[in-house]
Image (cartoon, rainbow, N blue to C red):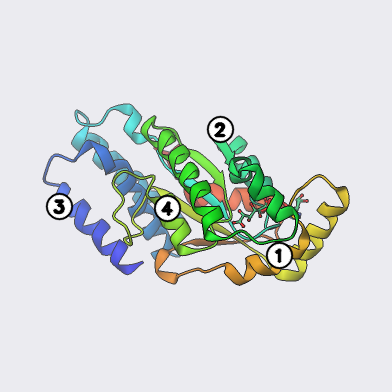
């Protein structure tokens, strides 16, 4: 997080006396605002600083910035193990912020779904081509300047690196990326109960017995700066939390 903060500040200082590059400026404002958010406990001050930053950049670089650049162009991946609420929250969030939602489950080949249905966890061989498809879908959105919400387990760091590579400017291992991750975090008991209930309804291919394999595979590296959200809160509260973290600042332009 600290190295991200330093790079961001260096970037802003450097470009405050220079013509900003069109591509990436929006993203660096986003990064700077997120860093400031984590450092400042007083959120009102944070909002004020942000407003000043936006108006400064706008006056300073008005001729370089087309209006569009002030809109976010990013991918937010709602991640976590089975039952965490990726589809539920992702869909609600996309509606709340008026952007498209993709469910990674819809990208699995039938063979993957059948394997999971039989209670066999996927292997890397099963997941990599699927992640590559998701990366391509994310990239298509970014290049057409659209923001997208993706619901995807993204359990391992190397899987998330594939998704991050949708950002054409991404330097592998830097975690400085327009693809953001939000981990829906909940204990095994809550998740097992949800999956049991869902299985009884009988309209999902994923059996509850695969939950432990997913929990075992989940790997989070602190340096990735992944936002963790309490997935046991109500869906509305979760959506509002994510919205406030990634989206609401832009309505204060
Ligand atoms: N915050 C929540 N509070 C209570 N129930 C929830 C919450 N989020 C999701 N659920 C319920 O839990 C079940 C699993 O949710 P959902 O299908 O969204 O999870 P998922 O992470 O997409 O799962 P999978 O990866 O297996 O597809 C659903 O029945 C859903 O209604
Ligand atoms: O990485 C994986 O093993 C898969 O993404 C699974 O997480 C399922 O797709 C999902 O949980 C079922 O909906």
Q: CA distance from mark 1 to mark 2?
A: 31 Å
Q: Residue at x 64, y 40 (%)?
A: 91
For this rendering, which residue is in front, 124 or 179?
124
Using residue 101 as the reference point, say whether residue 51 is left or right of it.
left
- Mark closer to the chain start, 3 or 1: 3
Specify few, some or many for label 1: CA neighbours under 10 Å numbering under 14, 14-19, or 20 or more. many
Label for residue 98?
A: 2
Q: Residue at x 52, y 59 (%)?
A: 124
Give the crowd class for mark 4: few <14, some 14-19, many >=20 residues within 10 Å.
Answer: some
Element type where label 1 sits in the image: helix
Whether residues under marks 3 and 1 lie with C-beta atoms below 8 angstroms apart, the answer is no
Which residue is farthest right?
A: 200
Sequence-wise, the earlier of marks 3 and 2 is 3
The image position of residue 249, as x and y in percent, is: 45, 45
Residue 215 locus on image (x, y percent): 64, 69
In the picture of the structure, the residue carrying the numbered disc 1 is 211
Q: Mark 3 highlights which residue?
A: 14
| Mark pair 3, 4: CA separation | 30 Å
Find numbered disc 2 in the image and state the secondary structure of the residue it sits on.
loop
Looking at marks 4 and 1 on the same chain, the residue that comes earlier in the sequence is marked by 4
- Residue 72 sits above or below residue 156 on the image: above
Per the image, the residue denoted by label 4 is 162
Q: CA distance from mark 4 to mark 2?
A: 26 Å
């Amino acid at each position: 997080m600290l190295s991200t903060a330093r790079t961001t500040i260096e970037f802003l200082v450097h470009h405050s006396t220079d013509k900003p590059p069109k591509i990436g400026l929006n993203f660096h404002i986003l990064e700077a605002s997120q860093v400031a958010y984590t450092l400042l406990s007083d959120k009102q001050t944070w909002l004020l600083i942000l407003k000043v930053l936006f108006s400064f950049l706008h006056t300073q670089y008005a001729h370089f910035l087309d209006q569009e650049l002030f809109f976010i162009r990013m991918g937010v991946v709602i991640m976590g193990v089975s039952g965490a609420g990726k589809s539920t929250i992702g869909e609600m969030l996309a509606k709340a912020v008026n952007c498209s939602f993709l469910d990674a489950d819809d990208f699995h080949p039938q063979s993957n779904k059948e394997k999971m249905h039989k209670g066999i966890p996927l292997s890397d061989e099963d997941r990599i081509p699927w992640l590559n498809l998701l990366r391509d879908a994310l990239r298509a959105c970014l290049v057409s300047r659209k923001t997208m919400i993706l619901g995807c387990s993204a359990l391992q760091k190397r899987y998330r690196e594939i998704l991050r590579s949708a950002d054409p400017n991404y330097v592998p291992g830097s975690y400085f990326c327009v693809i953001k991750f939000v981990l829906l975090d909940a204990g095994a008991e809550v998740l097992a109960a949800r999956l049991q209930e869902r299985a009884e309804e009988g309209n999902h291919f994923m059996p509850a017995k695969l939950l432990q394999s997913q929990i075992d595979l989940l790997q989070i590296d602190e340096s990735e700066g992944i936002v963790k959200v309490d997935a046991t809160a109500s869906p509305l509260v979760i959506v509002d939390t994510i919205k406030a973290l990634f989206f609401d600042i832009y309505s204060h332009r």
